[in-house]
Image (cartoon, helix red, strand yellow):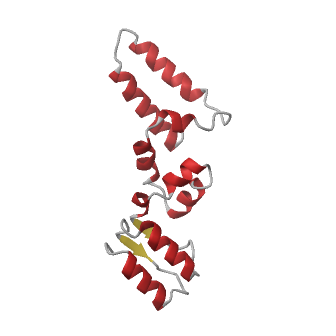
Amino acid sequence: QTFLEIYLFSWLKEMSNHNHNNHHSNNHCKIKSEICQYTDEDDAFINKKLPKELLLRIFSFLDVVSLCRCAQVSKYWNMLALDGSNWQRIDLFNFQTDIEGPVVEYMSQRCGGFLKALSLKGCQSITDRALQTFAQQCRNI
């Protein structure tokens, strides 16, 4: 099972416990079969079943590369992946060693109010101007 399937199953199980009627075991079987029958044909399945807050929580465990990949899945996932709450800690080591000015400006605008920790270890082309932009936009560092 994938990380997302585990979260999905846990959430659906919790939801079925809230609806704890006489058909509790039927709900459990239905939930398990929904997960097992999931296919790529229903791209919006996860978006329909999980609240935005839970998806954001799942995304909060992803690294920079994974968040960028998720942002390419759909417009909705792009919005979730680029939510500032997912960008509290940024580690660019082994991701982008030649960070350029526009990237710094975009990152600082996108997550400036949320960013608490930034690692530029290995970034060879970081300029004084880029650091100044981070200092101005990211006051929580």
Q: Quick one: which residue is furthest to the bottom in this view?
A: 128
Q: Which residue lies furthest to the top in this view?
A: 22
Image location (x, y in percent) of residue 117? 37, 71
**Which corner quadrant of the image does residue 39 belong to?**
top right
Q: Is residue 104 above or below residue 56?
A: below
Q: Residue at x 42, y 54 (%)?
A: 60
Query: Number of numbered discs present?
Result: 0
Q: Residue 85, located in which quarter of the rendered image?
A: bottom left
Task: Decide which of 69, 103 is in the foreground and name it.
Answer: 103
Q: Where is residue 121 in the image (x, y as percent from the top left)?
A: 47, 80
Looking at the image, which is closer to me, 47 or 20? 47
Residue 91 visible, this orientation:
no
Residue 74, compared with residue 66, is above or below; it is above
Q: Is residue 114 above or below residue 126?
A: above
Q: Is residue 53 visible?
A: yes
Q: Which image quarter is the C terminus in?
A: bottom left
x then y, percent, for residue 57: 40, 48
Q: Using the image, determine if residue 70 lies above or below residue 20.
A: below
Residue 22 percent location from the top left of the image: 36, 8
Seen at 43% across and 67% down, the residue is: 111
Image quarter hosting the N terminus? top right
Would residue 125 appear left or right of 42 to someone viewing this image? Answer: left
In this picture, residue 14 sits left or right of residue 47: left
- From the viewer's side, name the closer residue of 93 and 105: 105
Q: Quadrant of residue 100?
A: bottom right
Residue appearing at x 41%, y 33% in the figure:
11
